[in-house]
Image (tube, rainbow, N blue to C red):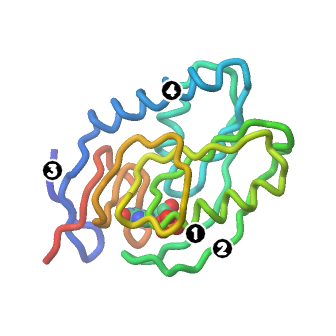
Amino acid sequence: MSRVIQVRDKQFAVSIPEEQIRKEVKRVAKEICRDYEGTQPVFLAVLNGSFIFAADLLREIDIPCEISFVRLASYQGVSTTGEIREVMGLNMDITGRPVIVLEDIVDTGLTMAHMLETLKAHNPSSIDICTLLLKPGKLQVKLDVRYCCMEIPNDFIVGYGLDYDSFGRNTKDIYTLVDK
Ligand code: 5GP
C-alpha cells in the first residue's frame, strides 16, 4: 500500500488507515442502533463527501431505517470559502421522523449549522449529527455533534470520499496534506 499519494498538484500521506476507519464506523453504528432501537430513523447523507462513509455505516445498521441523499457545499480547494449553499434533493417527507445527518467532516461547523436550520423547517421529530471526522480546533459555532467517528487536527485531508479539487475520493485510507 502506498503511504504517500499525489492528488493533482499536492502530496498526501496516510494518516488514518482503513482498519481504524472500519473499527470507528462500526463503533458509531452500534451506538446509533442502541439509541434508535424501535424508531425507524431516516439517514440523510450529505453528498458528495459522505458517500463512502454512508455506504459503510449503513451496512452496520441492523435496525429498520431509510436513507436519502442531500447536497450542499461550502468548500473549494483547500480552504473554506465561508459561502454556504442551499440544501438540495430532500425528496422525502421527514415530518415527525427522527433524522440522522451523515456528514464526512465538520470543520468550522457552519455547513452543519445551516443544514440543521433548514431541516428543522421540515419538522422532524429529532435531528442528530453523525460525522466521520471532526476538527475540534476549527469549530466556529456551537454544534452538538452526537456521533463522531474520529477527531482530527486542523490539517486538510483527502480520501475515503473526501476530495481535493474533486480528485482523491477513491481511496480506502484517509490522507493528510504534506506541507512543502
Ligand atoms: P464546514 O462548514 O464545517 O467548515 O465545512 C464542512 C465541509 O467542508 C465538509 O463537508 C467538507 O466538504 C469540507 N471540508 C472541511 N474540511 C475538509 C478537509 O480537510 N478535507 C476535505 N476534502 N474537505 C473538507
Decide which of tag 3 and tag 4 comes sooner along the chain. Answer: 3
Q: Disc 3 versus disc 4: distance between alpha carbons?
A: 33 Å
Mark 1 and mark 3 in contact? Answer it, CB < 8 Å: no
**Which is more foreground, mark 1 or mark 4?**
4
Decide which of tag 4 and tag 2 comes sooner along the chain. Answer: 4
Q: Which residue is mark 4?
A: 31
| Amino acid tagged 4 | Glu
Residue 133: image tag: none
Decide which of tag 1 and tag 4 comes sooner along the chain. Answer: 4
State the residue in front, 165 or 138: 138
Q: Position of residue 108 (x, y in %)?
A: 47, 67
Mark 1 and mark 4 in contact? Answer it, CB < 8 Å: no
Residue 85: image tag: 2
29, above or below 161, in the image: above
Q: Which residue is mark 3?
A: 2
Q: Quadrant of the N terminus?
A: top left
At x 72%, y 61%, the residue is: 117
